[in-house]
Image (cartoon, grey):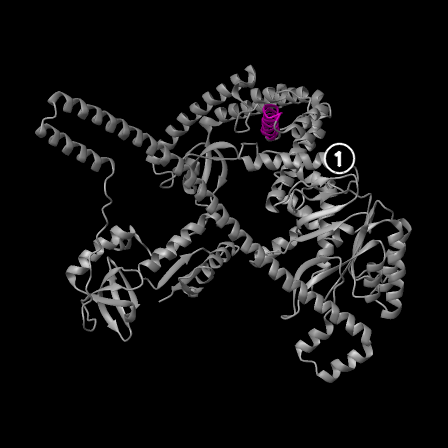
Amino acid sequence: MIYPKNLEEKINFTKIRELLKEACTGPLGMDFVDKMGFSKDPNLVGKLLDQTAEFKAIIESGELFPSSNFTNIYPYLEKAKIEGNFLYEEEFHEMRLSLFTLSRCIEFFKDHEEIYPNLFNLLGLVALDNTILKAIERIIDEKGKIRNNASQELSLIRSQILYEENRLRKVLDRIFRDAKAKGLTPEDASVTIRGGRMVIPVLAENKRKIKGFIHDESATGQTVYLEPAEVLDINNELKDLEYMEKREIQKILTKLTDVVRPSIPELRRAYHFLGMVDFIRAKAKFAIKTNSSRPILKKERQLDWSNARHPLLEFALKQQQKKIIPLNISLDHNRRLLVISGPNAGGKSVTLKTVAMVQYMLQCGLLVPLDGHSTCSLFDNFFIDIGDEQNIENDLSTYSSHLMSMKYFTEFADKRTILFIDEFGTGTEPQFGGAIAEGILLALNRTGAYGVLTTHYGNLKQIASKNQGLINGAMRYDVDKLEPLYQLDLGKPGSSFALEIASKIGISKDIIEYAKGHIGEDRVKYDKMLTKLENQLANYEQLVNENKKKERILDLRVKEYTDLKENIDQNKKKFLQDAKVEAKLLLDEVNKKIENTIADIKKSKGDKETTKQLRAEIEDLKVKVNPEKKAVSIPEVKDVEGDIQVGDYVRLIDNGTIAQVLALKKKEAEISIGDLKSNVKINRLQKISLSDAKKEKKSFAKRTGFDSNSKMLEYSPNLDIRGMRGEEILPLVQSFVDDGYMLGLKDLRIVHGKGNGILKEITRNLLRNMNPVAKMEDEHADRGGAGVTLVTLKA
């Protein structure tokens, strides 16, 4: 049961129907869009959702599926069922094309039975083979014309027509050439057709010089179109043949219609299937367009939705290049009726209409715009009261109309009902309206109904906080900026922020103080408490978000550490194993050498020269087994006295990089490191000689493994991380900044793009924790703006 009758217009579901019709290929699918309606049957709704989800998978997979000629042939079947009637060539041609589409659909579902079982089950509607299609194809060609070989008689007639036309053409050409030679015809004229007969153009003054029948004349009257007497019989013969052709074609089409007539019931069912396929595809295309999913359906009535969106609102915001703020909502048997409060234009009505639209779409068998893990339930009754229902004919005011709806709700609502009431209780004197609304709310709560209500009345917020089955909801508000955030918070009431908004706008303090006095101290304190809670919640959420960011960074660091430790442990085992193998080989070599030496000494009977030579060999072996470590010599670089001048070689004191001075600017110097240039403060430089500069470059690279010149050739002060994941950019950004700092650069540039702002946020959180970074800022708007971060390194 739905209430009121124009419910779809109230929630703008009629627009959804229009969009579905636009997605249909033909009128067959559009008819199903018109028939689509609210259902409370969980089996039916589940089947409709599964069918649409499977077709969505077909579209997303890119598999080829028929997309044309979903033609409505029901009018042709009505015509064909009458004995003696026949269908025309173009009607059979349309039937042929649509039957071909039908056969392709059937083949597709048969080939993919296991992948799309719910769509395959639709084939139970089809009890039609390709007999009719083949019969039509034998008669009608690809262009929709009767084939010459459709019958033996037709073939003979058309052959005779062709022969007579050729004969006629030859005779006319001869007569026309003679007339033209005699100057009886206009210049640049040719044989033509008038009234279905071939004629020649003749100048009006010469029309009596050629015997024949005049069929027409030109607009100026200077030319007449004459059928020469010589071809009159041939044209008559052609006319007779054309009549014979028409009669034969009619006979053929009548026989073909007789073939189709017995299968009309099967054809109706087959085209019902074809229309359903077109309808399901339209729903799937709409689901892709709205990023909709198949939720989890549960028998126990509950709503646990994640990231629900109103599809029409999302379309409108996309046109304005804005993003919709998704809705998260949870209702169950303990908290069934949600009472939403908050400031005007804060999103209360949008939230209500979003829940109403998504629930109604679901019960019409449409995939819905929310996350697929969301839980949904079906309701038997769907009641709504929104908008102005003032009725002049029945002499009902807006408030009276609302009360009529409330009467209906309280009489017919039960635990299988979901209801929606916007601006609950308004329309009359607040004191009385609030009291009546309170009584109605309690009565609706006793029915066990589910639903969403919006209100400004404080007494309804209090009722919702004290009674089981009711729950308060607040629309979030930025108290500092006095701007709505369009986010729903469950479990607490919302403030209208009327006093804050009035103060922000500039209403005088006297007026605001007067209002506070008449509102009452308790109510003012209550609103202040809500405002304070809103501030605390905003601060809490900011802290939570910051902690989450830090946790993500920590997780990345821990992962890096773990990977590094595993790598070290693995290498350690390998190095130890290699060392043991090498040590064993050396030991074996030493033992063998000692044994050989002893044997040689014995053979030489202690000869001094031989013993001396063998001792020298033993010493050489000792050096080989235990070589002394050669220390890397670091050349001593003497600082050159005097001020730094253009062309001098210098060393960066903080990292040892060697550079050449290109220019001096007050307290800064422009230096060249390889092919790259950089500006550095002079107090960071130490003047050295050319020879020492060459030695220092080699020594620095050998000591640190960091060759500044080769590094400069490879290094770019621009880093592009667009399209990367968060875990990928951490080592890149760290290495990029470290190398830039080691090379003495001052300004770096990181391109992350705008997008959702996630890469920018991760990048800047990383940069904040890096010691070399002095500051960071957005690039100029003309060169990328917020999509690029400029990094300034410390001097």
> Which residue is under mark 1?
44
Can residue 395 be seen from the camera position used here? no
Q: 481 left or right of 586?
A: right
Queried whether the magenta region covers residue 522, the answer comes back as: no
Name the quadrant of the C terminus: bottom left
Inspect the image, locate mark 1, and give the three-letter code of the amino acid beneath it: Leu
Q: Quadrant of residue 379?
A: top right
Q: Position of residue 50 (x, y in %)?
A: 68, 35
Q: Nearer the viewer, residue 731 or 262?
A: 731
User: In this picture, is 513 found above or below 712?
Assistant: below
Queried whether the magenta region covers residue 113, the answer comes back as: yes
Q: 505 left or right of 645?
A: right
Q: Position of residue 54 (x, y in %)?
A: 63, 34
Q: Position of residue 767 (x, y in %)?
A: 45, 59
Q: Nearer the viewer, residue 32 or 367?
A: 367
Q: Nearer the viewer, residue 316 or 166?
A: 316
Q: Secondary structure at mark 1?
A: helix
Q: Main secondary structure of the magenta part?
A: helix
Which residue is rendered at x = 65% and y = 43% of the image? 21
Q: Nearer the viewer, residue 361 or 706?
A: 706
